[in-house]
């Protein structure tokens, strides 16, 4: 981002008189605004995508009236939700009730600022990017607990209870599986992680050894649970808890939860693509780091993102829901031990490659370096 | 320790030292960390109670400690209305008891009235009745199978079953003019004859149903998550089932090989060759659990298809309406007639009084007895399992409350 702004300033004379700090601030605000708009619009499209795909899967049509193929259905839905009565239950804890959707929304959005869409297409290229994503998304839990507690409804509190238990537990295998990739990459900077996966398809981290391959499935499963997507949608299990933590929310506040959920889906798909599927690398050697190439990279990233979203939707509409205790069993007795095995395995793989195969192309490949 | 702990009171029988210690610790925990049981209402407006059932649960976290189903939210006096209307006018009300098995209800009510009035029903009408009743059984079971998926969080099978159900409802629509409530079976026979075209449509439909059942099994019965959610959950054993009067798939899943169609033959069911699926350990899961109840519904659809095929082959020519005297007034007599509905045994008790209307009518709805047993079965379950249990009992609240 900084480099980008510097290059713009260098080419534009009238900007050179202004203090550079001010320009950075403006640049970052603009980028954040763009991402906010892009992510919420795209979240709307993901909702449409989900409804159309589930329609196909269920032998029905799905929304196809508003706009071509129903593409702007989400705008109609948004207007509907905005024009609904905003009900705050009498017994609710009002300030917390009002604050909760904002916290959830913020948690889902902030993490977008470190995720690269293409080479250099990232608002904040931090060297702790991955760490920031994992920690910021955890804040969402706080908002959901607030929503469940402040609603003062029994179903909402039950939903929030499940939520806390599930999300906090699944952060463990999620984080540990991501750690495996950090070991391989040697960095938490998401741009660098992708740069090391460029070249042929076998350079993607998912294909670098059996442990990385397993880590991908652990990460994706844990991400599904973290997102409360089916088959782990217990916190909002409609047949058990009515609607879980957002039972008492209406209108736009409900829409905030809804959009936040889909934004988190997009975010985790992006992170999965960056960590395991080579980010903007199309799977064959081509330079996408130039000023125009990076937009092609953006397209590649977008395709991977859409594919991962499709898989999430596919899973959701095929499987029944897990039961509370089985979810915990899966987390602590299956995924967590497996993810630790992955970390140890990858550590040994890197050590082995470093000691015996140092310098050779295969050694670099095993160590997770760019070949 | 002045208050409470019975193990420390003087005069009590001496306890083992270890026990006292545990009691003390428990008391300390409960004094420092107060926990409360939460009472919540599941229903009447709740997505998983299949209508307006209200279950008051006392829960400890996710565990149900005690529960009480409350019924009566849509009580519509079906029986009392029957005592004030001529027999034939009561039939549409019967439809509305178990609205997912309207024709089966009509069938039972008509058979009871015919027994009371000693009426003859022509052969073709009997076959027609069996055909439509079995079509209705398939429709009802398809619904049960799909909705059970919905209860467990799988949305897709629910909409897939509508594909077949829709065509089945069209079939019944073509002969009766109604999609859900038909009023097709009449006292003395049927409202209309079954045309050849209709029978051809029926053949095509049952073939499709048979073909597509494996699809549902892929999504539910053979799905690992589904199996984990249902196997060994909500076990209603033989003893409990008999004590609470559970009938239908619930009773058969408990291993009781009982079906009115075969064991108390009525209509012309004794002329067909069909199996009564019942629970056993070979299916998987435990005897009488949710999984076996679901399995039995799937198998019963297959058996219904068999019955329809046989009835189709044997279908004789002739009238579909018998002789019913004008001003039908059955003599003083009482009749108790029971038959196998999709959900279990529906029985009609009736006293005639030589008048156009009955002196007394009382129905025994299977859903009512089936839901009653959850007080005993659901204790100590998780809330998610309670939903699985209620779903597997496949109740229709219209019939519970009548």
Image: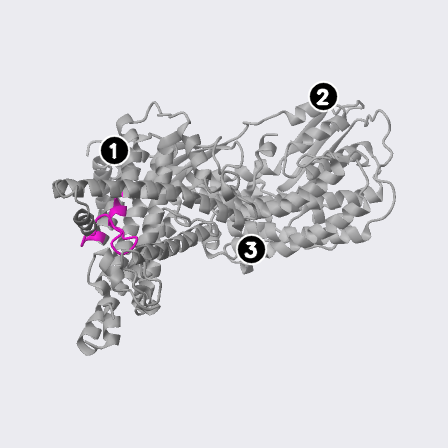
Q: Circle 1 marks a residue in which chain?
A: B
Q: Is residue B53 above or below residue B286?
A: above
Check whether the beta carbons of the residues at disc 3 and disc 1 lie within 8 A of each other. no
Q: Is residue B402 left or right of residue A232?
A: right
Q: What element carries label 2?
A: loop
Q: In this view, does A292 lie to the left or right of B118?
A: left
User: Relative to the observer, which residue lies in front, B271 or A85?
Assistant: A85
- Residue B240 in view: no
Residue B173: x and y in percent read 71, 38
Residue B130: x and y in percent read 75, 45
**CA neighbours of label 2 inside 10 A, class few (<14), some (14 to 19), many (20+):** some
Badge 1 and badge 2 in a common chain: yes
Dominant SS of magenta comes to: loop
Badge 3 and badge 1 in a common chain: yes
In the image, residue A120 lies in the stretch drawn in magenta: yes
Disc 1 versus disc 2: nearer the observer? 2
Q: Residue B84 carries which label?
A: 2
Residue range of the region highlighted in magenta in the rendering:
A110-129
Label 1 vs label 2: CA separation? 60 Å
Q: Which mark is residue A267?
A: none
Disc on the earlier residue, 3 or 1? 1
In the image, residue A79 lies in the stretch drawn in magenta: no
Q: How many labels does the image show?
A: 3
Residue B387: x and y in percent read 47, 42
Residue tagged by mark 3?
Answer: B217
- Residue B198 in view: yes
Residue tagged by mark 1?
Answer: B4
Q: In this view, does B66 lie to the left or right of B131?
A: left
């Amino acid at each position: 981002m900084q480099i980008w702004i510097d290059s713009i300033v260098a080419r534009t004379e009238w900007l050179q008189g202004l203090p550079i700090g001010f320009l950075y601030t403006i640049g970052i605000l603009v980028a954040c605004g763009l991402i906010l708009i892009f992510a919420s619009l795209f979240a709307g499209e993901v909702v449409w995508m989900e409804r159309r795909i589930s329609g196909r899967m269920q032998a029905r049509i799905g929304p196809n009236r508003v706009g071509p193929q129903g593409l702007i259905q989400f705008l109609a839905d948004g207007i509907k939700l905005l024009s609904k009565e905003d009900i705050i239950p009498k017994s609710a804890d009002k300030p917390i009730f009002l604050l909760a959707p904002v916290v959830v929304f913020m948690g889902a959005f902030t993490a977008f600022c470190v995720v690269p869409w293409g080479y250099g297409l990232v608002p904040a290229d931090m060297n702790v990017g991955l760490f920031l994503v994992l920690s910021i998304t955890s804040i969402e839990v706080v908002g959901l607990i607030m929503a469940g507690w402040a609603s003062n409804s029994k179903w909402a509190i039950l939903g929030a209870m499940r939520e806390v238990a599930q999300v906090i537990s699944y952060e463990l295998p999620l984080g540990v599986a991501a750690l495996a990739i950090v070991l391989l990459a040697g960095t938490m900077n998401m741009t660098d992680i992708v740069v090391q996966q460029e070249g042929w398809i076998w350079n993607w981290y998912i294909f670098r050894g059996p442990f990385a391959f397993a880590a991908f499935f652990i990460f994706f499963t844990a991400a599904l649970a973290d997102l409360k997507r089916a088959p782990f949608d217990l916190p909002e299990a409609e047949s058990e808890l009515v609607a879980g933590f957002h039972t008492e929310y209406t209108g736009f506040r409900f829409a905030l939860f809804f959009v936040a959920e889909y934004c988190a889906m997009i975010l985790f798909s992006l992170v999965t693509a960056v960590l395991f599927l080579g980010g903007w690398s199309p799977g064959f050697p081509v330079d996408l780091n130039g000023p125009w190439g990076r937009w092609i990279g953006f397209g590649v990233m977008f395709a991977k993102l859409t594919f991962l979203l499709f898989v999430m939707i596919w899973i959701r509409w095929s499987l029944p829901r897990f039961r509370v205790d089985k979810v915990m069993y899966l987390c602590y007795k299956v995924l967590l031990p497996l993810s630790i095995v992955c970390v140890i395995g990858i550590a040994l793989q890197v050590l082995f490659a470093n000691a015996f195969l140092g310098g050779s192309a295969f050694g670099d490949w095993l160590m997770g370096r760019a070949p | 320790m002045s208050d409470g702990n019975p193990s420390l009171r003087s005069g009590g029988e001496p306890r083992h030292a270890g026990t006292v210690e545990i009691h003390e610790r428990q008391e300390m925990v409960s004094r420092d960390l107060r926990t409360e049981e939460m009472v919540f209402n599941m229903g009447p407006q709740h997505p998983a109670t299949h209508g307006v059932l209200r279950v008051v649960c006392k829960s400890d976290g996710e565990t149900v400690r005690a529960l009480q189903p409350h019924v009566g939210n849509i009580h519509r006096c079906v029986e009392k209305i029957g005592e004030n209307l001529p027999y034939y006018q009561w039939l549409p009300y019967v439809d509305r008891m178990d609205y997912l098995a309207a024709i089966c209800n009509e069938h039972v009510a008509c058979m009871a009235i015919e027994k009371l009035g000693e009426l003859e029903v022509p052969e073709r009408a009997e076959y027609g009745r069996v055909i439509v009743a079995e079509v209705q059984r398939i429709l009802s079971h398809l619904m049960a199978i799909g909705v059970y998926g919905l209860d467990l969080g799988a949305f897709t099978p629910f909409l897939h079953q509508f594909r077949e159900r829709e065509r089945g409802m069209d079939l019944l629509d073509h002969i009766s003019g109604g999609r859900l409530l038909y009023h097709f079976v009449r006292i003395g026979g049927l409202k209309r004859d079954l045309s050849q075209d209709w029978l051809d449509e029926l053949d095509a439909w049952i073939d499709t149903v048979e073909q597509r059942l494996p699809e549902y099994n892929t999504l539910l019965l053979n799905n690992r998550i589904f199996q984990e959610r249902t196997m060994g959950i909500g076990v209603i054993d033989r003893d409990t089932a008999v004590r609470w009067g559970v009938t239908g798939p619930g009773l058969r899943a408990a291993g009781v090989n009982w079906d009115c169609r075969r064991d108390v033959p009525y209509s012309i069911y004794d002329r067909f060759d069909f199996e009564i699926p019942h629970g056993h350990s070979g299916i998987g899961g435990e005897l009488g659990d949710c999984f076996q109840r679901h399995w039995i519904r799937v198998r019963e659809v297959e058996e219904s298809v068999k019955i329809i095929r046989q009835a189709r082959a044997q279908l004789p020519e002739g009238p579909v309406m018998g002789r019913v005297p004008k001003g039908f007034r059955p003599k003083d007599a009482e009749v108790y007639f029971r038959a196998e509905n999709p959900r279990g045994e529906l029985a009609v008790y009736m006293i005639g009084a030589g008048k156009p209307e009955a002196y007394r009518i009382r129905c025994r709805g299977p859903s009512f007895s089936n839901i009653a047993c959850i007080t005993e079965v659901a204790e100590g379950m998780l809330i998610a399992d309670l939903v699985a249990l209620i779903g597997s009992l496949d109740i229709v609240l219209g019939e519970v409350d009548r």
